[in-house]
Amino acid sequence: MKLRVERDVLAEAVTWAARALPTRPPVPVLAGLLLDASTDGVLRLSSFDYEVSARVEVAADILDGGTVLVSGKLLADICRSLPGKPVDVSTDGSRVSLTCGASRFTLLTMPVDEYPTLPAMPDGSGTVPGDLFSQAVSQVTVAASRDETLPILTGVRMEIEGENLTLLATDRYRLAMRTLTWRPSSPDVSTVALVRARTLSEVSKALGAGSDVTLALSTAGGGNELIGFEAGGRRTTSLLVDGEYPKVRALFPPESPTYAVVEAQSLVEAVRRVALVAERHTPVRLTFTDGVITLEAGQGEDAQASEAVEASLVGDELSMAFNPQFLLDGLGALTVPFARLSFTVPAKPAVISGQVEAEGDDDTSYRYLLMPVRLNS
């Protein structure tokens, strides 16, 4: 192998591909990054951990093609430190040399024949604007569980029905749902996939930079169900989470007779301030009256705080308590100026949605359901 590639191009490609490297590889070769230089002027970099694969293609001036496997973490560290000059990459037996200006590095290669074959990209199911996809994923993944003992809840359920793509996630204490319009390859497509929230979040950040993202699903059965994402010469695949996701849609109430509308940022700032005196695992109480939401935290001989925020209330006055961080996650996911907090009865979950204006209908394309915390009487 002998090639030349721009330093920034190589560094960005290596960093992106290396993100899929396992922290504790089950076999040594999985710590490697596969570099495949073809005579068509394309350098392909790949990584794989048996669950998630990543591949990126970049243009390079290739004199001699070839394939090598080197330590991915070491290569990423080196590429980030190189000066801003073209990088020459060449092989000599079991070594790979990188020369950039006056800098020269030599790396040992790993056995290419022991590296597993990357899974093939499934056929494309449709496309979605990258920025819209990235926003939707960030709104939903805040509610996914981090508890690996419940792998089903660490996933995001993707429901595809024609032009509607719905993302759902829950950790049993809150539930986030976002529906958006996408462009399916078939107008009558109908399928469901459960993707790890961590993987989906990383992919959406890496690919959602403006270009359209192609979603590709393979659910042929046999335990090899895959989802693929592709944009701008980058592609990644991931095994789907196996199991039946709980039927969470029914948790959203069909109607909410009581709701309050408040400027979202004002409520966020108030919750942050009041929560300063809330010890770990203690809630913030919100009392809804006509024209005001009163926030309180702390009790007894502990530090206490309270603050009032202007709001409009429709329906009966009530008081509820919430985990302050869960409440902030829901409010922070809104992309419009006003938040609507909807209720059925105080013992039932509250639903947060957004509104463009203080008066009018809420935007139900994103809803965040939050369980209240029971207070000691």
Image (cartoon, rainbow, N blue to C red):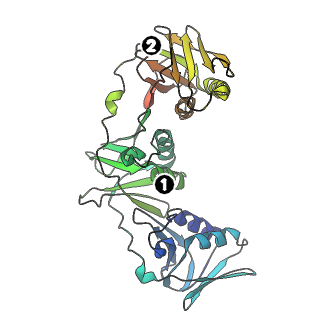
Please report the residue visible at 32 percent of the width from the left and 44 percent of the height from the top. Answer: 160
Q: Earlier in the sequence, mark 1 or mark 2?
A: 1
Closer to the camera in the image, 360 or 195: 195
> Quick one: label 1, few (<14), some, or many (20+) residues within 10 Å?
many
- Kindly identify which residue carries mark 1: 203
Q: What residue appears at the point 40 percent right and 66 percent down from the top-left corner?
A: 50
Question: Which percent across, then down, holds residue 193?
Answer: 33, 49
Residue furthest to the bottom: 93
- Cα distance between the residues tagged 1 and 2: 38 Å
Residue 245 picture location, percent across and down:
32, 42
Q: Is residue 82 left or right of residue 17?
A: right
The reply to whether dot 1 and dot 2 touch (C-beta < 8 Å) is: no
Q: For the residue labelled by badge 1, is the local secondary structure a helix, a strand or a loop? A: helix
Q: What residue sits 36% from the left and 44% below the top?
A: 157
Depicted 256 relative to depicted 117: above or below: above
- Residue 218 position (above or below residue 149): below
Which amino acid, by three-letter code, is at mark 2? Thr
Q: Which residue is mark 2?
A: 258
